[in-house]
Image (cartoon, rainbow, N blue to C red):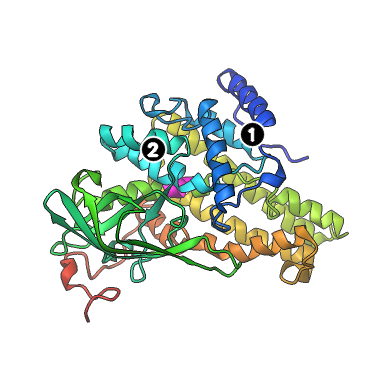
Amino acid sequence: MTRELRATGPRTDGFRRRVRDWLAEHAPSGDDRVPEASESAPTEEQLAAARRFQAALYDAGLAGITWPVEYGGQGLSAAEQQVFHEEAAGYDLPTGVFLISMGMCGPTLVDLGTHEQKTRYLPPLLRGEEIWCQLFSEPGAGSDVASLQTRAVRDGDSWVVNGQKVWTSGAQYADFGALLARTDPDVVKHRGLTMFVVDMRAPGVTVRPLQDMTGAAPFNEVYFDDVRIPADAVIGEVDAGWSAAVTMLGHERVSIGGAVRRRYDPMTFANLREAARARGVADDPVVRAELAELYAAERKLALFNSRLRQQSDAGIAPGARGSVAKLAGAQLLWQAVRVAGLVVGPRAIAWDPTDASGDELALAINATPASSIAGGTNQIQRGILGDRVLGLPKEPRVDRDVPFRELRVGTQAR
């Protein structure tokens, strides 16, 4: 049996029992499954079921576990959050549609939002009444987000936004978004950005789904045509949006890299080991060696994330070290793809459509390339770690002291 890394101690044992008992009674059955945000957009019926479940979590005191009590959270530690993730890993909970809300936008509002913003947005976010998305990437500004060209111009008591975003997960069902836009093109690109709360149903907002290689449509293009945003919708400070973005990206990388992998995930060591036994290749020395390496990689990532949570409890923010978890998580999935190919052979890419397990494995393999891109590419993560963790010299940048208006980026005039 695989020994699991678990948070233990008098402080968490009682909480674990409460979570375990509640999930045993309230977790939906497999027939009620809602797709993860990375898989596809849920139907209206599935979305309603997800909202009901999130509201039940909130009523049970199991939503916003580490968030301030003043804004609807539980005011507990990262250890209790880890306990919840560990117990929830055994279920197929309909919470994927809230991943960006809970893991990225909400924590950023906790850090940077005004009292009025926190009071307005955090409680309904925790109850599942309102879903958020993140509006950063553009056709000409992916890894280099600071090159974005979406403009926000002040007009009286509001801002007018024009531009385009892309690869926005969940935008087709989101109620609000955290939008990064350029508010001053006459300064260097990192200093003229501002983050806003934007109503995704405001006049002038258009959402168009994008289909990926799995056949699902989890991403979207989002267009802004003279969209008006109230002046009090700024998150943080005007023209200090890059700092706000770094805060949100830090939460994103910890959220992605620190996620506890579900037990039904066909790409885990445990499930690939069972697949190897079922196919009679568990005694093959190459397969055994690869499985052992995968097990070790899973354990290393779990131990690292456990350390981050312990340090968070001690008041030490993860900072740039969150990129370690993000990078390691992406590399782990690619390692699992290699093991899956050894274990199941051609079935990994050409499966029997009547075999549900084969279909799930193939979809997981096809979705893996996104892990090296979403939330910042592996190359970006390595650059962050080199600069901010290892203290290596930065790469030369020709745009460091040039006003954005003068840069040749994206679709900006050549």
Q: Which residues are magenta?
A: 251-255
Lateral position of residue 130 relative to residue 233, left or right: right
Tell me where residue 146 appears, x and y as whole percent: 28, 61
Instruction: Establish if 112 lies above or below 382.
Output: above
Task: Tell me the residue that label 2 is attached to.
Answer: 317
Task: Assign a secondary structure to mark 2.
Answer: loop
Task: Tell me the residue that label 1 is attached to.
Answer: 87
Residue 57 magenta-drawn? no
Which residue corresponds to the image point at 71% horizontal and 70% vertical from the top-left?
349
Which residue corresponds to the image point at 32% horizontal and 37% vertical from the top-left?
111
Neighbours of disc 1 within 10 Å: few (<14), some (14-19), many (20+): some
Tell me where residue 25 appears, x and y as whole percent: 68, 29
Tell me where residue 188 appears, x and y as whole percent: 18, 62
Question: Dots 2 and 1: beta carbons under 8 Å?
Answer: no
Q: Quadrant of the N terminus?
A: top right
Q: Residue 94, can we see it?
A: yes
